[in-house]
Image (cartoon, helix red, strand yellow):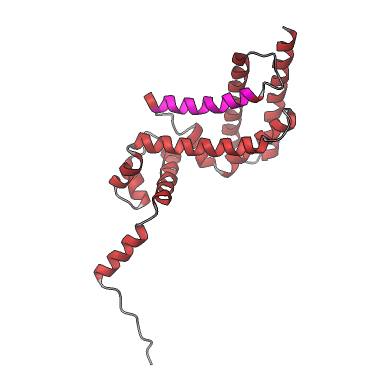
Amino acid sequence: MQPTRRPAPPPARSAELRRARRRLAPARRAEQLLDVAERLFAEQDYGSTSIEQIAVAAGVTRPVVYDRFGSKDGIYLACLRRARTQLEESMFTAMAGLEPGPDQLRRGAEAYFGFVESNPQRWRVLFGGGAAVSGAIAEEAVRLRFGTEARFAEMMRTVAPHASEARRRGLAHAIGGAAHQLAQWWLRTPELSRGAVVDSYCDFAWPAILALATRASAS
């Protein structure tokens, strides 16, 4: 006896099912669009990515993307803000509750390079995917980065209480740039362990912080 085959749903019903699969809660849809845009920005860079490509890759129409983010600039900045928030939460949560010193710095470095290791695509967009941007969105990207560095500068106050805010901000900018450059190099040198990269960073950053504290106390 031949098994009974279930009849295919009528065309109207099939279209309804496809639409149901495409319908997502607003927050989930926004996250999906950000994930797709982030991947394309990391693979192609900002200038080579279009709203049309994002929409096609996400399985939606262009108006859906425009409705959520307004423009390509808008979705790019949303990717940056999401990545920056996650990176900051990872680092500052890791350092919370520790006395200012080399252990606290190491915890932060482990979190930073852990983010690079587990989210290389997200890190590339945050630090490298905006090479073609300019104007207001470039300024916003800088503002976000400087905001993180300002938090590090404030944390240095306990270690270097006599250093001026400008000196602490300058050093925070320098060691932040060092982390960026080291991460870029590490992504091209994958055989190096995360622990070894963290060691290299701390070998540079902690003596620099101590030198700032010593000079400020002596002046």
Vertical order, 107 against 153 (above or below): below
In the picture provided, is 28 more to the left or to the right than 174? left
Q: Residue at x 31, y 60 (%)?
A: 19
Q: Is residue 189 left or right of residue 15?
A: right
Quadrant where the C terminus lies?
A: top right
Q: Which quadrant of the view contains residue 88?
A: top right
Closer to the camera, 19 or 36? Answer: 19
Frontmost residue, 121 versus 82: 82
Let me know if residue 189 appears in the view. no
Place of residue 51 in the rendered image (x, y in percent of width and height, measured from the top left):
32, 41
Give the magenta-colored segment's residue range.
137-154
Task: Please indicate whether residue 120 sits to the left or right of residue 194 in the image.
Answer: left
Q: For the point 45% across and 34% down, which residue is it?
A: 129
Residue 193 image offset from top left, x and y in percent = 68, 40
Judge whether 168 appears above or below 13 on screen.
Answer: above
Q: Quadrant of the N terminus?
A: bottom left
Residue 140 in picture, x, y percent from top left: 44, 27
**Number of callouts in the render?**
0
Residue 77 lies in what quarter of the image? top left
Residue 169 within the magenta-colored segment of the rendering: no
Q: Main secondary structure of the magenta part?
A: helix
Q: Please report the residue visible at 32 percent of the width from the left and 38 percent of the height from the top.
A: 70
